[in-house]
Every structure is written in C-alpha cells, then in structure tokens.
Image (cartoon, rainbow, N blue to C red):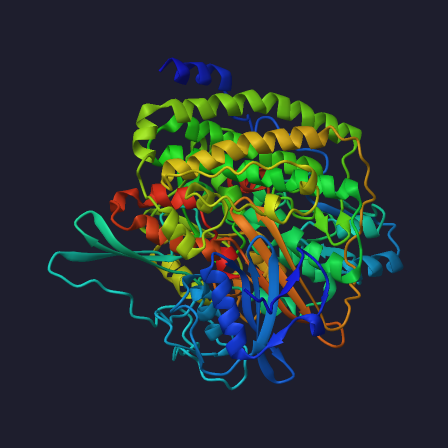
Amino acid sequence: MLSVLKNRFEQGCRTNRYPKEKVKVFPRYRGRPVIQDNISQAILKACAASCPQDAIDVQNKKIDMGRCVFCGTCENASNGLIKFTNDYEISTSERADLITSGELPALAEHAKQHFKKLFGRSLQLRQVSAAGCNACEADLNVLATPFFDLGRFGINFVASPRHADGIVVTGPVSRNMKTALLQTYEATPAPKVVIAVGSCTISGGPFTGSPEITEGLDKILPVDLFIPGCPPHPMTNLHALLSFFK
Amino acid sequence: MSNAFLQISNAEKVCRKEIPHLSFDEFRTQALDMVTDGGKVVQYFAYPDKNRLKLLAVLRTDKLFVAGCDVPDPYPSFTRICEPFHLFEREMAEQYGIRPQGHPWLKMVRYHPNYSDGTADVFGNDYTQDIPGNYTYYQVEGQEIHEVAVGPVHAGVIEPGHFRFNCIGERVLHLEIQLGYQHRGIEKQLTEVPDKRLPILGENIAGDTTIGHSLCMAQNLETLTAVQPDQGAQVIRTIALELERLANHIGDLGALSGDVAFLPPANYFGRIRGDFLNLSLLICGNRFGKGLVRPGGVRFSLSNEIRRVLNDRLAELRPEVTHVLELLFNAVTVRARFEGCGTVSHEDAEYLGLVGPAGRASGMAYDVRRCFPTEHYPHINIPKNKKATGDVYARARVRYDEIHQSLQIIESLAAIPIETRCVSDGMAYDLPASSFSVALNEAWRGEVSHAVLTDENGKILRYKIKDPSFHNWNGLAMALRDTGISDFPLNNKSFNLSYCGFDL
C-alpha cells in the first residue's frame, strides 16, 4: 500500500489542459503541410514524382492530406518550400477540404451543428479496426491514458455498437472486414456519426491499388469527420472530437 | 550429417544460381532432418519462376541455411512429421494452390484467392463473398460442451480476429484462432508498386513493429544494391528498435496489470508508454518511427539538441519506470494471478517453434540480436533472458528484464557522439538480377524476417514477409488449453500478437 501511495505522489497529475492550453509537440513532428506560393512548377513536379503516395497535385498546387502519409519526402525534395508545420489541428468535415495548399476551414464551424446538441455532452463511440497497421488504433487507445483522459469530456469508447452514437473506423477496409464493418454500422442506432481515422481509411493510404481493400471509407459509408495522418497524432484525434462535437 | 543446404549470413546477397536446387525428395529429407534435430523454419515459401512453381526454405540452427526445389503438386506434407512447417504449408496452399498431402489441418490462413491464375482453390472457397466464414470450426462433442465465439469485432480498440473456444464449464479445452480479416495483400503489392512506395509499405505491415519490419526491408535492399549504411545510421536504427521494444513492453505490462485489475501500474505504464513513443517522435517526427529507416541509412540524424532532450527524458523516465515495475512485480496479488497461468511447456514451445519473449519465457534463449546480429548489435552484449516456467509471469518477467536492458542500451548509444549522413527518400533501387537475400531482426515480439528474390531483369519476383506472430499464435492457443476462459484476456495480452503482421 505504501508503495502504491509513493508511486502516486511520484506520478502526480499528468493530464494536459487542452483545449485551454495548447500541447506542444517536438519540433520534428510533421503536421499540416503548407505549400509556399513561390514554389516553382519544376520543384513541385519533382516533389510529386518523389511522393510515394502520389498525393501532390502539381496543376493546382495542392496536397491531398487524405492520401499523404506525412513522411516528409516532399519537404526534403523542395528544400522546405513544402513545409510540414507543427500544427496538429488538421481534421475536416469534408473530404474535399483535405486537398489543400495549407489552408483549412475551421472545423468547429462545420455544417452539422445539430451533432453538437445531440452528442456535445455525451458521445459514446464504437471503434472498428478494418485492416490498418494498428498504429491508428494504438493512438486512439492512448486517449484513455491519464495524459489525454478523453473521459473528462464525456467521450468514451464502448464495447457494443448498440451502446454507441457512432463508429470510428481505422484501416483501409479489407474485403474480409467489409461485412463486419457494415454490420457494426447497421447495429448502431440512428442518429449516428461515422469518423474516418487515418490515411488508409480516407483513401486506402499505403495500400492504394490493392484489390483486397476499399479505397476510401466514404465510398461505402457517409463519413462525417475525416482525421488525416499516418497515424493521426493523439492530439489530432482529440482536437477533431472536441471541435466537431463540443 | 551431410548438408546439401547452403550456409548464408543474415542479410547477405546470394546469387540465385548458387542456392542449391535439390530434388524434391532430397530437399524434403534434408529439411525435415534439420528441423527435427532442433533447427527452426525462418522462411518457407513458394514462388513462380518461368511458369514453374518452386519452393525455397531458409532454416536456422546456430547458422542460416537456404535451399530450394521444384514442387510436385500434390506433395507429401512435412507437417505430419514436423510441426513448425504447419502454417507455412497452409500459406503455400492458399497463395499458390499447392496441396500438401496428408496435412493434418489444411485450412485457409488469410482467406484470399490464390496468385496462380487458373489454379483451383485448395479450400473450395468462393471469394466473391467478402467474409472469411466458409469454414467449419473444430468442434468438441459432448453433453456439457459449449462454444464461445468472439470477434472479428472485439469489445475494445483492437484489431479484428475470430476466436472460437470449446469449453467445459469455465475450462477451455481448445481454442481455435481464425485470422485474415486484416489481409491487405502486401506481399503481392510489393512486387507490383514503384520503388518509391516500398519503404512506405514496409513500415505499414505492422505499425507497432515499424522499425523491425523497416530494418528487414532496408537491410535486404542495401545488401542487394551493395550500399552500406554508415555507423551513425546503424546506431540510430538500433536506438529506434530499442525504443520500439521499450514502448511496447511497457504498454504490455500496463495492459497485463489492467487485466488483473491492478490499476495504478496500468495507468502509469499507459502514460509512460506514450513518453517512449514521443521519443521516437523526437528523433523522426512520428510516434511509431515511420519515416526514419530507409534503405541506405536513416532520414534523420541525432543533433546535439535532440541528443540532449533524449538524455534528459531518459534520466527522468528511468526512475519512474523502475518504481512502477517494482510496484507491479512486488504485488502479491499480481504474482498470484500471473504465476501458473497459461503455461506453455518448453517441450511445446520447441515443438511449435515459438520465438521472441514468448519463446524465451518457455526456455528458448533464441534472440536474433545475439544469434544473427545486425546494425550495432554485434557490439552489444545481449543476455539470454530465458525463463523456465512458460506462464504469464515468465512472459511478463522477460519484458521486465528487457525493459531494463533496452534502457541501458539506449543510454549508452545516445552517448556516442557519432554523425550520420541522412539519406533521401522517393528513389529507385537498382536491384541486381537473379539474386536473393533474407534479413532477420529481433523486434519486440521476436524474429521478423523478410526475403527477397529478384528475376533476371532485377525486378522483385517474390517478396516474403514473416512477422513473429506467424510462429506464436498457436502458442496462445496452446496456453489456453485447460485454462479458465476468464483468463483469456490476460493470456492474450501476455503474448500480445499482431493481427496485421500475420494477415499481411
């Protein structure tokens, strides 16, 4: 018992004060990408060619955060003219908004304001892991740890879709998980939300082109919230949930 | 014993014509001899070569061996004589439609159509149905027998898989594990995608083992293209692999603690695990180490500032980790739940060919870092870490030891002020024609291995991935025998195997 108490004092209170205070991340973190106005067509072309995800649209000078895995290859290739900022608040309510040169609409002002009334005080989510690499699941799981403590906002992950207000999907939805995913969605009572977490879920991500997967959850379910990243930083997840529902 | 197999080194380029191409009978006799004598299967797979199917096996004793042969279809199953071939033979049947005659349990592995056009499906599945369900599970009969079916969607934020328990009362007689729900077709994709996508696919095989899998891919491509990463890069990669081990082992101990309802360490370790993930982010910008390892070296160096922060954080974390470890392992209630739970005997572990902490907990000392060291490991002394009891306690205790060792390894490596030239990404690899390489690394779950074969034009002909989970899932099934079904979560966590690493 003494040891329990001793450890309790050593640990102290570790919960962050987000959203009142921004949480700082280490400088090498790669968040929202920004394409500088003065980037030349030639450099942008070189970036597009080296991008493993083919996420760069040279014509429109835009980068698709739904395809991007935030590897930073283009940042190197462009000598910083494409820059991954430290900004982790990068989720959107529309798929098209993820295709950007750096500007994002404020998530808090999305069109589905009635969700805030419905789910603002209590949001119960069922997570469905559908063929990713388990990193997105891991960084959703940490939201339950003391540092993030998602429960303090009235948001929880629950065991049954019957108890849930919506589903959080990770992974590129393999053929082998599609039916299970759709059944989980069916089992969730309406009104319900669908949240797509991670590059795989939004576009197929690294597995784009494989016949075993679905390229984009929005092709089979109506997605309300897109959280990009590979995986999204836990703060990205937290920001998305708080801005969209609170 | 005369050995017709060719002895090779870890991550060594071998010309394919140097690999002994044996007659099937000789291949079979030699492979079976080696494995029944205590050898283990590292890789065993089929590949197409000019419209013919061939087999290739990489076996290990205290050395690595390779040989191949043509495959007669059907062929007499090896599994009947030697269990470690079990899943490999099923995998070959699924991937290429090759039927192992007399296989004791020929069922699908991942539920996907085979890669050989026009070859009949071994399992008689109709793949237009997109659920892996066309299969009659193993059944136990009797009046008081009942079945519990769990998954694919589990009651937590975890990966999908199906577990079928045959129980009498609370006691599990048999657990059958059916995976495949996470199948993305990675092996096939790796032979088709442009080179720039290879490292990205490699690090997304299993996100919690990003560094382990990336290292295997990088080492193979490096040895094939004759590129040697500098010493600084090797040090950083070693640090990254140990950080990955630390984060996962600490997370596992926290989860084990939660599963026996001892909540303080569960919460503390949950948070501390995140701190170690953040150290990976400190180095490379990603909590899982994605983007760090690339063929040729690393993409991020350790600047003095990064080194300073890393050392400061480690100095801060070490006492916390030590104290919470003591809190967990000194609690008698925890020991009472861990000890004697889910025992896998040394004999069973040998028979199944378990690897990693699960193997070491059952008395198998094998550790790639010591037996076939890569990167900076030849300069590091890795203890044997083996335990005798094979229960949840032993599996937890191996992690306890390895946490202390990894901390020390990282501290000593971070002190080496060595520079590296960062490599860039998005490039093409000029692979040599008709070559082969296999790489092994000790990731936190155990032996990860990738094998690459190139064709006569230097294109990747076959890319074979093996996650340690491929060896260990049957260990979990074995641990559950005669165990209370309520101890499943505890046992499951003590193995903490990868679904996506298995499903590919």
Q: Specify the farthest residue to the front.
A: B1
- Left or right: residue B315 compared with residue B301: left
Q: Nearer the viewer, residue B162 or A89?
A: B162
Q: Is residue A64 above or below residue B25?
A: above
Residue occupying the point 32% across, 34% down? B339
Quarter of the figure that contains the N terminus of chain B? bottom right
- Left or right: residue B259 compared with residue B30: left
Q: Nearer the viewer, residue A4 or B245?
A: B245
Q: Nearer the viewer, residue A37 or B312?
A: B312
Residue occupying the point 50% across, 20% down? A13
Give the image location of residue B350, x and y in percent: 42, 52
Give the image location of residue A236, x and y in percent: 59, 41
Residue A143 visible, this orientation? no
Q: Is residue A191 above or below residue B104?
A: above
Give the image location of residue A218, x and y in percent: 53, 61
Give the image location of residue A63, x and y in percent: 72, 55
Residue B357 visible, this orientation? yes
Q: Specify the farthest residue to the left.
A: B143
Q: Quadrant of residue B405?
A: top right
Q: How many marks?
A: 0
Q: Quadrant of residue B175?
A: bottom left
